[in-house]
Image (cartoon, rainbow, N blue to C red):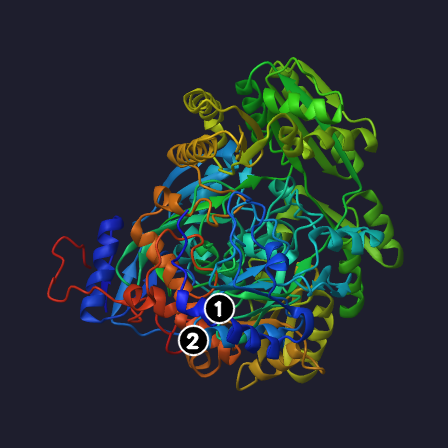
């Protein structure tokens, strides 16, 4: 595999242009911390973006930060912390889950977090990675430099291509520079913990919690029928970081790890339905709307059971299950991402055609053939 | 404004087309008479008018799909329309195009408090959603000033904002799913009651696509619990620089207000003359800062903002004491457009966004332009997110003033881009800013956007003439320029 590490936009364009000319597809990586996520790739060329790094503009009072796409999240977090701000979508660090050595795990980048649209627990209130992605510049699979969005927090000029890039796993363009919205850190943090509820009761309680005013009345109301305790500031931050980074499921070795997004009220029943059929360890985030599950023993890693459970008995349930971690064989044999309806799959393929007609960028990372 | 050349041969076949559409949408759903079509000739950007070939008002998704399929087969252009409140001409009809009105899709289908969402048809108005859930303590956050009339389908098409979007986001941050119909008649469901997309975020690009990619036939919106308390501060400053510095300092202090609005002297005077709410008249800039949340949090933040304002030499600082007073503070701002309409026969509302640090400079240059074009301008400004709404005052009955107002407006938007901002913060490009797209994007940027259009509508039949200054055929856009033999690239580091 030949490796290309462009140092600037022009070299990036040349690297893609050359791959296009010789029809040798590129695997696009930055820090490489999420290479195990998605369908396994075996491509002749590696496009390493890690030199496209560094914060280029940061104005705390404008709530905007522009950086090279491969800027390490650690570097961004440090700069933001100095101004009392944060990336409110809380990009997870999946290093422990993937069992990566510290050196690789620490290499997660801003562009990588955006390209995978990964968001942490605060997503239900602050929005996802895609909601904080304001603008970018990059090179499409046509070997052409283009930009979209802007460097201000409010903008509706042209199609919102940032949304399309978020979650596209490098299959449409190699990002060179990105602009994100940043937000103030909370002044104080407190976590309320309620003990001893079963899955269904817990989800009902979570639902009441997010629908009620967040003040001292909440604890009084929710803690009335079970044991309650609370965590403040540093302890609270540590707890939610563990939730964000999927640490509760990090010790399950070779199990298939699934991330399932459903209507929040259905999280509890979904977890129970899957547990009844498969050996499962799980937890719920997003007030019940996000299920993390570690599945053992199933030949398809649990894909069929999970995806049937999402649709539910009446077939009308909405949601999607993503195989975050699994052996390469498993990730080749079951759809890693939720299968789409035929017209949506066709549309998705046509979108890929527009940006990458020769399938040069990460082909097959999301779906075989695109 | 040049629109695509109407197809005379197609217009001649109008009777056939009407007949075919009547077979799909029976009864009153097909509007033919000139008097009735006149209702649809323009949207909120009234400077542009055009009678549509025919108006169709379907009432089911199957009818929408059949109309689009038929139009694709014959090669008829289609312009979708909600309530027609667009300020950028997004729903401007075409002489040889079908106007597809979605007004009959006016039902709220489901309200799901457990999942904090509502499933509604696209013709439901923005405010009707909040009204339907307010008894349970919920609301729908985006609140464009046209919210009494504008529809949620139009909000999706335009990615509408409002005064509270600094804290609560635009439409794109507040919807969970849609059902849509492609120009080829295919019905596609995106999202649902869950968060985020797997695979490409098609919902994300549909939002704000200005009716060029598909027709929305159902929307699932997030609803939020209403904050228990909201209070506002009225703060007056001797200079706009002081006001801008105050805004930057509030945000720098880690406060994201629910709303933070600025008005300049002409806007303050016009609003006060209209609604008489006690705005100070001896200031150059007025801020309305609203904080919401739990009572203790709101009181704490009001004190902090007040301290910052005092430190920045504010000459007026008035916190609202009760709900009627908070609403009074807002009533002047919300009436700013009609208030300006009282002092001038016509006004033209602009919508650029700038980095806030450049505000004083932009206002100064706007004053110079105002003298140059001999037209007054009043400014209202979503100060928190840098979204400017300069209102250019003119008189359409005076020869040359319309043209001068348009040229002045274009110069303001170019200025926004020059200082690092964008052409439109929330009103959309439409026909209005179409020809200015080149100031922000180069041809390659625009070609990438138009290729997305090709994936949805390869014949370019859906709302053509909007957003993009030039129409290119998809075959031409799709052509790949590979320079085989220009190998290898000697300067490229390899490992």
In this rendered view, identify the residue nearer to me: A34 or A12: A12
Q: From what the image shows, is residue B361 above or below residue A32?
A: above
Quarter where residue A15 is shown: bottom left
Q: Seen in the image, is B379 located left or right of residue A74?
A: right
> For residue A190, which numbered disc appears in the image?
none
The residue drawn where x is 62% and y is 61% is B176
**Residue A67, x across and y down, in percent:** 39, 44
- Distance CA(mark 1)–CA(mark 2): 9 Å
Quarter where residue B203 is shown: bottom right
Chain of the residue displaying label 2? A
Observer able to see residue A35: no
- In which quadrant is the N terminus of chain A drawn? bottom left
**Residue B421, x across and y down, in percent:** 44, 37
Chain of the residue displaying label 1? B
Q: Seen in the image, is A254 located left or right of residue A315?
A: left
The residue drawn where x is 46% and y is 63% is B96
Q: From what the image shows, is residue A113 above or below residue A86?
A: below
Observer able to see residue B478: yes
Residues at circles 1 and 2 in contact by the CB criterion of under 8 Å: yes
Q: From what the image shows, is residue B493 above or below residue B421?
A: below
Mark 2 lies on residue: A367
**Residue B12, x across and y down, in percent:** 45, 69
Mark 1 lies on residue: B199
The residue drawn where x is 68% and y is 78% is A316
- In which quadrant is the C terminus of chain A drawn? bottom left
Residue ranking furthest to the bottom: A299
Of helix, strand and loop, which one carries label 2?
Answer: loop
């Amino acid at each position: 595999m030949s490796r290309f590490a462009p140092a600037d936009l022009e070299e990036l364009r040349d690297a893609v242009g050359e791959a296009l000319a010789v029809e040798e597809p590129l695997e696009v990586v930055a820090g490489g911390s999420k290479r195990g996520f998605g369908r396994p790739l075996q491509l002749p060329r590696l496009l390493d973006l890690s030199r496209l790094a560094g914060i280029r503009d940061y104005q705390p009072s404008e709530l905007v930060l522009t950086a090279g796409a491969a800027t390490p999240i650690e570097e961004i977090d440090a700069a933001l912390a100095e101004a009392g701000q944060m990336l409110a979508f809380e990009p997870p660090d999946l290093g422990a889950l993937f069992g990566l050595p510290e050196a690789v795990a620490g290499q997660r980048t801003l562009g990588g977090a955006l390209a995978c649209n990964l968001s942490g627990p605060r997503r239900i209130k602050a929005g996802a990675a895609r909601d904080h992605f304001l603008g970018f510049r990059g090179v499409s699979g046509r070997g052409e430099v283009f930009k979209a969005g802007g460097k201000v927090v409010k903008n509706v000029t042209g199609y919102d291509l940032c949304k399309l890039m978020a979650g596209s796993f490098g299959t449409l363009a190699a990002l060179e520079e990105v602009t994100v919205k940043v937000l103030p850190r909370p002044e104080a943090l407190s976590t309320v913990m309620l003990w001893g509820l079963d899955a269904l009761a817990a989800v009902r309680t979570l639902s009441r919690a997010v629908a009620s005013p967040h003040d001292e009345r909440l604890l009084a109301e929710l803690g009335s029928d079970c044991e309650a305790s609370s965590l403040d500031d540093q302890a609270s931050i540590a707890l939610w970081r563990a939730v964000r980074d999927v640490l509760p499921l990090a010790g399950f070795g070779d199990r298939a790890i699934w991330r399932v997004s459903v209507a929040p009220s259905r999280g509890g029943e979904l977890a129970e339905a899957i547990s009844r059929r498969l050996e499962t360890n799980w937890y719920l985030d997003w007030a019940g709307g996000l299920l993390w599950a570690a599945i053992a023993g199933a030949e398809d890693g649990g894909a069929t059971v999970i995806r049937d459970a999402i649709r539910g008995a009446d077939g009308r349930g909405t949601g999607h299950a993503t195989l975050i971690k699994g052996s390469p064989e498993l990730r080749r044999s079951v759809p890693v991402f939720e299968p789409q309806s035929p017209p949506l799959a066709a549309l998705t393929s046509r979108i890929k055609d527009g940006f990458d007609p020769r399938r040069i960028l990460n082909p097959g990372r999301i779906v075989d053939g695109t | 404004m040049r629109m695509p050349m109407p197809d005379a041969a197609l217009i001649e076949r109008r009777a056939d087309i009407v007949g075919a559409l009547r077979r799909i949408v029976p009864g009153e759903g097909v509007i033919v008479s000139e008097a009735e079509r006149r209702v649809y000739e323009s949207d909120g950007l009234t400077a542009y008018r055009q009678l549509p070939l025919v108006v169709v008002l379907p009432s089911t998704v199957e009818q929408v799909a059949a109309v689009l399929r038929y139009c694709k087969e014959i090669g008829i252009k289609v312009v979708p329309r909600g309530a027609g409140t667009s300020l950028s001409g997004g729903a401007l009809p075409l002489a040889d195009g079908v106007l597809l009105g979605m007004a009959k899709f006016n039902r709220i289908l489901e309200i799901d408090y457990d999942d904090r969402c509502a499933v509604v048809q696209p013709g439901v108005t923005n405010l009707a959603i909040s009204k339907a859930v307010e008894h349970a303590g919920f609301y729908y956050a985006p609140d464009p000033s046209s919210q009494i009339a504008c529809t949620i389908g139009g909000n999706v098409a335009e990615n509408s904002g409002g005064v509270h979007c600094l804290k609560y986001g635009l439409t794109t941050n507040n919807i969970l799913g849609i059902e849509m119909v492609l120009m080829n008649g295919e019905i596609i469901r995106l999202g649902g009651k869950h968060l985020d997309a797997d695979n490409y975020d098609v919902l994300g690009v549909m939002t704000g696509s200005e009716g060029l990619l598909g027709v929305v036939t159902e929307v699932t919106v997030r609803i939020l619990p209403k904050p228990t308390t909201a209070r506002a501060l009225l703060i007056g400053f001797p200079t706009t620089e002081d006001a801008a510095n105050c805004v930057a300092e509030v945000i720098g202090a880690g406060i994201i207000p629910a709303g933070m609005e600025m008005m300049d002297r002409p806007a303050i005077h016009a609003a006060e003359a209209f609604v008489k709410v006690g705005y100070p008249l001896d200031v150059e800039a007025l801020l309305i800062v609203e904080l919401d949340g739990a009572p203790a949090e709101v009181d704490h933040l009001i004190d902090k903002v007040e301290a910052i304002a005092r430190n920045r030499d504010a000459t007026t600082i008035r916190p609202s004491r009760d709900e009627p007073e908070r609403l009074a503070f807002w009533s002047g701002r919300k009436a700013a457009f009609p208030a300006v309409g009282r002092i001038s026969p016509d006004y033209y509302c602009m919508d650029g966004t700038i980095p806030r640090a450049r505000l004083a400079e932009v206002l100064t240059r706007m004053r110079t332009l105002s003298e140059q074009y001999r037209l007054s301008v009043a400014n209202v400004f979503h100060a928190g997110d840098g979204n400017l709404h300069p209102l250019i005052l003119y008189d359409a009955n005076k020869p040359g003033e319309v043209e001068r107002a348009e040229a002045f407006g274009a110069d303001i938007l170019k200025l926004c881009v020059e200082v690092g901002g964008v052409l439109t913060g929330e009103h959309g490009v439409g026909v209005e800013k179409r020809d200015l797209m080149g100031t922000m994007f180069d041809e390659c940027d625009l070609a990438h956007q138009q290729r997305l259009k090709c994936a949805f509508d390869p014949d370019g039949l859906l709302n053509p003439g909007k957003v993009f200054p030039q129409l290119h055929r998809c075959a031409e856009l799709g052509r790949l320029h590979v320079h085989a033999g220009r190998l290898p690239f000697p300067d490229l580091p390899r490992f």
